Structure formats: C-alpha cells, structure tokens
Image (cartoon, rainbow, N blue to C red):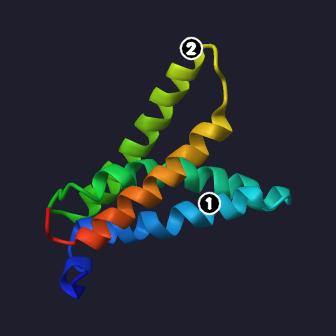
Amino acid sequence: MSAGFIRQLPGRTACFGLVCAPLAVVLLVIPEPWARLPGAFLLACVPPGAMIMCWLDSGDGVAQACLTLLTSLSCLALSGAIMIWASAWHPKVALYGFAVAAVLSCGTRLVLGTRR
C-alpha cells in the first residue's frame, strides 16, 4: 500500500470504513444503553456506503462523504425491504453482515491500493 493512495478519496473512505465498522460493532456489543444507539447509528450510516464508495472516486471530499452516507442508508433501506418481503426479519444479522462486508471490501481496497 502506498502512502499516496491514502491521500486520495477512495483510500480515505476505505480507512474510514475500516475503522468505523469494528468500532460500531464494539459499541453494539457493550450492554450499556449509552453505547448502543451511537453504535447503531454509526453502523447504519458508514460501513455499507464505505464498502462501495472505497472503489469509486467522486472527485470531491464533500461529495464522497455525502455519497457514502446516502449509499449506506440506501443499502439499509433495501435490506429492510428485502427482509420484510421475505418474512425474515433479522436486522442484527444484516447490520453485522454489513460490518463484515465493509471490513473485507475496505481492507481489500487498501491492500490493492491503486492497482486494480
């Protein structure tokens, strides 16, 4: 991994997703109520979008952050609709699955760097 790649938007998005996904899971596992709500918000707003947006470069930092948030919320809404349609309501499994997928995707992107 080159240090120059981290200065680019996809590299920063991958680092952010790689940090936020495990942090959100740790906050959700803590039994205290003060930690669970921020963990759920963090897990809903960052990892699903980071797992996709770390592969795309919007060219602008604000646009990259907004697209990451919108992609995350869209993935969450789509997974909720699929769970309702399939009569298989398991939101914890979906959220933890997004966290695992984000770690794998962002980690792969950081290892590959600018190579594709």
Q: Residues within 10 Å of mark 2 (few under 14, many from 20)?
A: few
The tag on residue 24 is: 1
Q: In the image, is 95 to the left or to the right of 4?
A: right
Q: Say which of 62 and 48 sits in front.
A: 48
Residue 61: give x, y in percent of width and height.
Answer: 25, 66
Q: Quadrant of residue 12?
A: bottom left
Q: Quadrant of residue 58?
A: bottom left
Q: Residue at x 29, y 53 (%)?
A: 53
The tag on residue 86 is: 2
Nearer mark to the viewer, of 1 and 2: 2
Q: Residue at x 24, y 87 (%)?
A: 3
Q: Residues within 10 Å of mark 1 (few under 14, many from 20)?
A: many
Q: In the image, is 88 to the left or to the right of 71?
A: right
Q: In the image, is 55 to the left or to the right of 101?
A: left
Q: Earlier in the sequence, mark 1 or mark 2?
A: 1
Q: Residue at x 33, y 58 (%)?
A: 65
In this view, which residue lies farthest toward the bottom? 3
Counting the numbered discs, the total is 2
Q: Say which of 113 and 57 sits in front.
A: 113
Q: CA distance from mark 1 to mark 2?
A: 27 Å
Residue 91: give x, y in percent of width and height.
Answer: 64, 34
The quarter of the rendered structure image containing the N terminus is: bottom left
Mark 1 and mark 2 in contact? Answer it, CB < 8 Å.
no
Residue 5 versus residue 33 in the image, above or below? below
Instruction: Indicate the amino acid at tag 1.
Output: Ala
Q: Quadrant of residue 54?
A: bottom left
The tag on residue 37 is: none
Residue 50 versus residue 95 in the image, above or below? below
Q: Say which of 97 and 71 sits in front.
A: 97
Residue 1 versus residue 82 in the image, above or below? below
